[in-house]
Image (tube, rainbow, N blue to C red):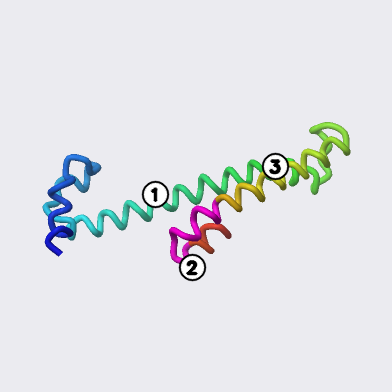
Amino acid sequence: AHAAVTLGAQYRARLPRPLDVQASFLACALALRKAAGELGGAQVERQRALVGETLGAAVRFVRGDASGGGGGALEAEAHASVRRATHHLRHLAAVWLPALAPAVAAHALAA
């Protein structure tokens, strides 16, 4: 318990701005929780954008947009984009499922 109380003072120099003035780890807990929520939300948004970008060719294929080339080329690009998105989601699941609570991980992957 003593070690947890003194963590804030011990790592004060390495902590970001709002946390480096706290005297104990317990005082840092709320600020750490808020920062973790913000960082987690930003990470989910980045991953959502990346998966959406990866699926762009598949969306164009479904919409029938042939501006990216002939129908066969667009179909091949759509298949490749779905494979890339599936690979990316598997990687995210492998990283997030062991680290996050089940409800949080399910929300992050389905977001």
Horizontally, is 108 left or right of 61 in the view?
A: left
Q: Which residue is mark 3?
A: 56
Mark found first going from the N terminus, 3 or 2: 3
Please provide percent x and percent y for residue 44.
49, 51
Give the SS element for disc 2.
Answer: helix
Residue nearest the viewer, comparing 8 with 28: 8
In the image, is 58 to the left or to the right of 87?
Answer: right
Residue 28 image-quadrant placement: bottom left
Does 8 lie within the magenta span? no
Residue at 44% from the left image edge and 61% from the top image edge:
100
Picture coordinates of residue 67 (x, y %)?
81, 33
The span from disc 2 to disc 1 (Cα, nearest Å) is: 18 Å
Q: Separation of disc 3 and disc 2 at Cα?
A: 28 Å
- Return the residue found at the far bottom: 103
Say if mark 2 contacts mark 1, CB within 8 Å: no
Q: Amino acid at mark 1?
A: Leu
Would you name the residue on which mark 2 appears? 103
Residue shown at the point (82%, 38%) measured from the top left: 74
Residue at left offset 54%, top offset 55%: 94
Q: Which amino acid, by three-letter code, is at mark 3? A: Gly
In terms of sequence position, does the residue under pointer 3 or pointer 1 come before the other?
1
Q: CA distance from mark 3 to mark 1?
A: 26 Å
Specify start and end residues of the magenta stretch as a single range: 92-104
Place of residue 71 in the rendered image (x, y in percent of width and height, measured from the top left): 88, 38
> Label 1: which residue?
39
Left or right of residue 16, residue 6 in this image: left
